[in-house]
Every structure is written in C-alpha cells, then in structure tokens.
Amino acid sequence: MRKSTLLFFPILVLGCGGGDSGGGGANEVDATPPEALRPPDSLRVHDSLPPADSLSLSVADSLAEGPAAEEEPEAESPERNERFPRPEFVRGIYLNAWASGSTRRSGALITLARRTEVNAFVIDIKDATGYVSHATEVPLAREVGATGEIRIRDLPGLLDRLEEAGVYPIARIVVAKDPLLSEGMPELAIQDSAGGVWLDQDGVRWLNFYDRRVWDYHVNLAREVVRLGFPEVQWDYVRFPDAPEAFMGR
C-alpha cells in the first residue's frame, strides 16, 4: 500500500512587495545582484520548514484518485520523475508569473541557477489574484474569467528550458484567496450570517474549504500542470481566515 508523503517548505520573503498583487509585470529582474544586495521583489527563498498555510506535495503521492489508489501495487517511479529528479536538498527561488513568462527574465534567473547553489524554481500557476498563469483547459477557470491574464504564454517551453538547465520546477497554486472564483461563484465563498458573502476586515472574500467543489477546482488545475511535466505542487493559503472578533462572529 502506497503511503502519501507530505513535503513541507517555508517561503521566506526577500524584499518588499509580493508577486500576488497582480502588477508585477513592470518590475525587471537582473541576474546581477543590486548594489545593496537586496534580492529582486519576484524572488523568495524556498527552504526547509513551512509557514502554517503552505505545503508542498510530491506528485506521485499527492494527486492519487482517492481510496482506489491506496490499493494499487507499488510501481516504478513515473517517467516525469526521470525528467525532473528531485534534488537531495531543494534550494529554490520563487518566480511570480510575470518573471516566469518573460524569456529574458527567466533566462537571467536560469543563468543565476547555473552559477549558484539554486536548483529549483517555485512558479506561480495561480496566485492570490485568482488568475491562472497559462492557457488552462479547466472549464471552471474559463467560466470565472481566470484566463483573463495569461502571464506564461509558453509553459511547456519554460519547462523544457528548466529541464535542460537541471532546474527542478515546483508549481505554486494559491487556494483560499481567489477573488475571481468567489465572485463568479459566490456560493463557494464563506457566507455571512447576515446574508451574502462574508468579507474580512480588508474586504477580502475567502473560499469555503468545506465545499468539495473548491478542492476539485484546484486539484484539476494541479493535474493539468502535472501532465505538462511539473513533478511537485505547492499549495499556498491552505487555511481559513483570521480576522478581528467582530468579523469572525458573523
């Protein structure tokens, strides 16, 4: 019987401003460190222990079809693992979707990986804006407008270049924060006891983790990028909201 393995990692933020604002396209990333040695805003270190709301799963175990998968006999590692063998020690950087989709910027970061100990890239597949970075075929993503900003226009080509450079790719998928899904299908969001969708103190909607359709949407996105070649998926914002008592009371 195959046992699922959870692989946990933290995201240590380097620099100001996150890639989840949706406006990272104007920031240029240079492979040469700035004079003050401040890392570019689109880079984060991917190390050994996770924040409470982030976890990373090896694809061979995490995307099983359910109880039936437990009964499958032990098999050889799938071919995709031969394409991207997992490093003994993952030393990665986070690339927002804009940096990942730019040939020049991603090329500069591949050059950085070639000459340093960096051996993995965490790549945004869906960030907290709700947009899916590539031209996904997942129907619900198209239905709610998640394909409105294609930031990585050639995801297979990016994976080919990472394979050639020996860089291990990890697909980052944000779950709980998704303004597009919660607006397009408000029944999937946490509800307010006074009626309608609940909003936190910042006016943010949160998806309802008790609804299996929320799970299915994100697993379908993960399955798609696994078929494209990603050997690992990092789920981010895997949590319920935290807010002042006056908000949580509703």
Image: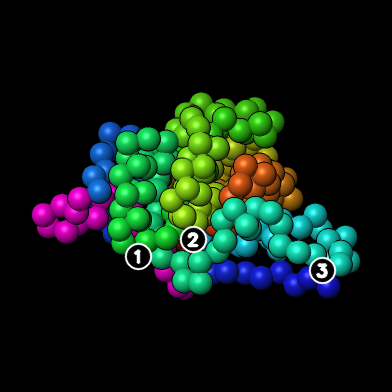
Tell me the quadrant of the picture where the C terminus can be found: bottom right
User: According to the image, label 2 marks what residue?
Assistant: 242
Placement of 133 over or under 202, stated as above or below: above
Residue 230 showing in the rendered view: yes
Question: The disc labelled 1 sits on which kind of residue?
Answer: Glu
In this rendering, position of residue 175 left or right of residue 35: right
Labelled disc at residue 117: 1
Question: The disc labelled 3 sits on which kind of residue?
Answer: Glu
User: According to the image, label 3 marks what residue?
Assistant: 74
Residue 111 x %, y %: 32, 49
Q: Which of disc 2 and disc 3 is earlier in sequence? A: 3
Q: Residue at x 50, y 32 (%)?
A: 154
Q: Residue at x 28, y 34 (%)?
A: 26
Front-lying residue, 202 or 13: 13
In which image quadrant can residue 86 be found? Answer: bottom right
Instruction: Give the distance between the C-alpha atoms of the residues marked 3 and 1, in whole angstroms.
Output: 34 Å
Q: Residue at x 52, y 62 (%)?
A: 54
Tell me the quadrant of the picture where the N terminus can be found: bottom right
Helix, strand or loop status at disc 2: loop
Q: Is residue 45 magenta?
A: yes
Question: The disc labelled 2 sits on which kind of residue?
Answer: Asp
